[in-house]
Amino acid sequence: MQCNTTSDVIGEILKLFKEDGVIKKRDSVIKELFKQSIINKEEFEKLLKSEMDRNSKAVQINKEMRDDEIGKLCEQLAQDGKSKFLDWVQTVLLDTCYAKIYLEKKAQMDIDSSKNFTVINDTDVPVVSPVSYHSLVLNQSVPLVPWNCEQASICKDLKFLQLLHKLGFHMPVDSGKVFIRIPHFWTPDSIFDVASKISPID
């Protein structure tokens, strides 16, 4: 192999392909080298493992960069006097987290109630956000509904939109909906995790 003396053999092979106008992925090059018996099984497994390590490091670096960007955006919004809107988003996230847990527990209780009937006192259970509850019951993403003019105007603020986008919210432009939305497939843990990125939770 021409590239055998370099530290990144696969990278050099990719450069050669690129010079010829061919775009390939690193793992496909490794598989092709093994298929053509240019590398043995041990080298193949070693290269695949190093690619997996390389990819996991890149993912970790991207996550750390995203978390830093989220922290900076939160700081900038707080410095601009918009921390009450961060609190509002965090509250909606926590309400959605609670609604999701409530529905999961309720579904489990419905299954268990066929075996053993117990009456629950509704006054002991906190009120579930109706927006979150009904959206989740319908298996829909939960809208971030602005309840006043200030909240409606912050939903047009560029920094605020960047923050929500980096947190993983569905933007109206992307989803074709009216409101910014919390994805319905997020688990309670992931929702809580996103809420804690905005500010520490008591």
Image (spheres, rainbow, N blue to C red):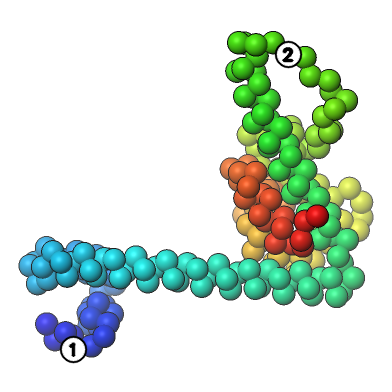
Camera-nearest label, 1 or 2: 2
Which residue type does callout 1 highlight?
A: Thr
Residue 141 in picture, x, y percent from top left: 66, 42
Choose between 120 and 52: the one closer to the eye: 120
Q: Is residue 19 visible?
A: no
Q: Residue furthest bottom?
A: 5
**Image point (72%, 52%), residue name:** 180
Choose between 183 and 41: the one closer to the eye: 41
Classify residue 138 by image quadrant. top right
Counting every numbered tag in the picture gives 2
Q: 122 above or below 92?
A: above
Q: Which quadrant does the N terminus fall into? A: bottom left
Q: Which quadrant does the C terminus fall into? A: bottom right
Disc 2 is placed on an element classified as: loop
- On residue 5, the disc is 1
Which residue type does callout 2 highlight?
A: Thr
Marks 1/2: CA distance? 73 Å
- Mark 1 is surrounded, within 10 Å at the Cα level, by few (under 14), some (14 to 19) or many (20 or more) other residues, namely few
Disc on the earlier residue, 1 or 2: 1
Residue 82 in picture, x, y percent from top left: 87, 67
- Mark 2 is surrounded, within 10 Å at the Cα level, by few (under 14), some (14 to 19) or many (20 or more) other residues, namely few
Residue linked to disc 2: 118
- On residue 20, the disc is none
Classify residue 121 by image quadrant. top right
Choose between 7 and 23: the one closer to the eye: 7
